[in-house]
Image: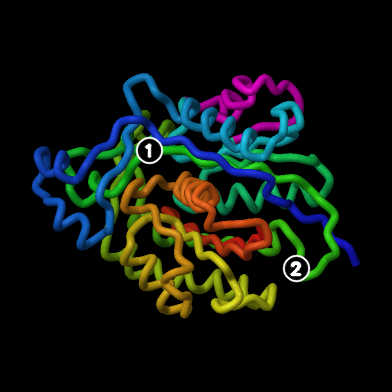
Amino acid sequence: MTAIRSVVLGCGSYLPERILTNAELASKVDTSDEWIVQRTGIKQRHIAADGEFTSHLAIKAAQAALANAGVDAQSIDLIVLATSTPDNTFPATAVAVQNALGITHGAAFDLQAVCSGFIFGLTTADSLLRTGAGKRALVIGAETFSRILDWTDRGTCVLFGDGAGAVVLEAQTQPGEASDRGVLTTHLRSDGRHKEKLFVDGGPSSTQTVGYLRMEGREVFKHAVGMITDVIVDAFKATGASAETIDWFVPHQANKRIIDASAHKLHIAPQKVVLTVDLHGNTSAASIPLALSVAVNDGRIKKGDLVLLEAMGGGFTWGSALIRW
């Protein structure tokens, strides 16, 4: 029995030039480098320049991914852009990416699942490719969270940054075994009862404003580890994989304490964990593809490696994906 798998051909990323350090933040709000690092592991984050939009970041990440994959933009049938910070209420920021790449065929749309957006986008693209709806897809996570932060709220403004990451997927026929390359399994969850714990207090229908990010940090932390491990256990059950057999764990980069606690609970060795939260902060939907790009570029993630992804975000939403690179 053969199977159609969505194989990763390449990945790319982009970070705005401006770096905002903890020391600079400490000069603006009542915080310190020691306080931020101890509680989050974050040392710095990138901030989009004036006039630099989510679409600009996404376009550069997409171009980098296409170059890394060695494929032409015209071979892309589908663009799924995960973001909570679109350029406009509509149209989708994905069509701006499509236009910039000179693509006039296929489909492009945005997907909103906050920090879980890349996992949701990957799952969506994988599902469409396996039905034969397309041959190649760009899955992008891109955010300018700096635009929705209350810079007087030390509990949230220290956590987030801007950036974008992308992968190119191609539908390929594989033997249908655990050794197949590509997306092997994905698991998505959401629970709207937790909305008030992490949300933005504005929107076109409710307030006609953009609003600011609001978070109950302790509540989010309390739920995160259990929810993350839940969908990873599901991924292991679906494939027969385990903490011992995976090569790399690439989690959503929200907080080093959450990442460490999740890896410990799952018995994943620390040396298998890809960490970029110290340099990027929480870039929401962009964090996983940014981390993937770093680990691919520095030679850690190689063809044939078994890579476990997970994320949790506002909603709450959460999910996992297991990929043979």
The residue to which callout 2 is attached is 179
Assign the N terminus to one quadrant of the image.
bottom right
Q: Residue 230: where, in percent of width, then height?
A: 52, 73
Q: Residue 26: where, in percent of width, then height?
A: 12, 44
Above or below, comparing residue 71 to residue 318 in the picture: above
The answer to whether any part of residue 187 appears in the image is no
Question: Magenta span covers which residues?
Answer: 88-109
Of badges 2 and 1, the one in the foreground is 2
Query: Closer to the camera, 199 or 186?
Result: 186
Query: Closer to the camera, 42 or 217?
Result: 42
The residue to which callout 1 is attached is 162
Which residue is at 56% across, 79% downward? 244
Q: Which mark is residue 32?
A: none
At label 2, the amino acid type is Ser
Counting residues from the start of the chain, the first of labels 2 and 1 encountered is: 1
Above or below, comparing residue 290 to residue 61 in the picture: below
Assign the C terminus to one quadrant of the image.
bottom right
